[in-house]
Amino acid sequence: MTNHEGRASDGIVRSLEGRIVSGELPDGRPLPPERNLMLEYGTSRTVVREAVLALASRGLVEARPRHRPVVRKPGPDTALKALESTVSHLLEAEDGLKHLFRSRILIEQGLVQHAATRARSEQVAELEAALQANEAAIGQSERFYETDKTFHEVLYKMPGNPIWPAVYTLYLTWLFPKWLKMPDDTARNEQNHRAHKSIVDAVKSQDPQAASNALTAHLEAAWQQLETSGEASADRAR
């Protein structure tokens, strides 16, 4: 791509971005056909494709082979989704997965402290319901993993900030496949359920420090489980 093409595509990116943000190009609808964009902006197919790639890298469109790109209006989900490829590369680095997991611990420490001090009664009830479903699934590993996801998801939803559920979705994208590859282990499921119960007990007691300690112990143990299984280094070994 020449410098001229780069400048031309930058102008198209700015124009299309403005149309997406304003709603002129609605969320979930395809972009206009490539030929239409070429005519509208008086430019080449190469420049239009460069512009679409730039929009996709920002999470503003979803581009799939043999399909017209689909508009994704800016929001926490789309903004953070743009990080997926970058973080995927970071995970290839030594200790990349460990650093990502440590970041999750720090975030969830804050979330459980928030839950212990500010959660409403209906939110605590939702957390208790997730705990009960988790207990009922102990003997069914795949189902247990699903209830484990739901339990932690409740914590991310409690503050009412849409950024946190979006962050959790990315953690699931990056980390949860590792758990699915681990062998079934009822004893491990029982251990994780007991840890969840300790978190709930601390939240119900409105003790933020105890909640943070229980959460930290839980995720530290989960990391050890991942390391013991070999999944923590599986990507680098391949």
Image (tube, rainbow, N blue to C red):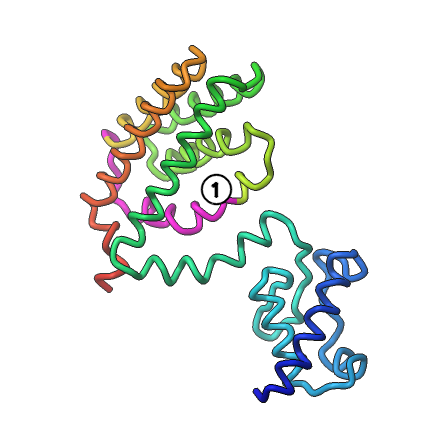
**At numbered mark 1, what does the secondary structure look like: helix, strand or loop?**
helix
Q: Position of residue 134 (x, y in %)?
A: 40, 27
| Residue 50 x %, y % | 61, 78
- Image coordinates for residue 212, horizontal then vertical, percent: 37, 24
Relative to 139, say whether 67 is above or below: below
Q: Is 104 inside the magenta-drawn segment? A: no
Query: Which residue: 62% across, 81% down?
Result: 6
Residue at image location 41% in from the left, 19% down from the top: 208
Crowding at dot 1, Cα within 10 Å, few <14 / some 14-19 / many 20+, comes out as many
| In this picture, residue 45 sits left or right of residue 179 | right
Picture quadrant where residue 145 is located: top left
Position of residue 192 measured from the top left corner of the image (x, y, whole percent): 31, 29
Locate residue 93: give its quadrant. Answer: bottom left
Q: Is residue 161 above or below residue 116?
A: below
Task: Please state which amino acid type lies under the numbered disc 1.
Answer: Tyr
Query: Which residue does the numbered mark 1 point to in the structure image?
Result: 168
Q: Who is closer to the viewer here, 179 or 152?
A: 152
Residue 89 left/right relative to 161: left
Which residues are drawn in magenta?
167-187
* Residue under the point 53% across and 55% down: 81
| Main secondary structure found in the magenta portion | helix
129 is higher (above) or lower (below) than 147: above
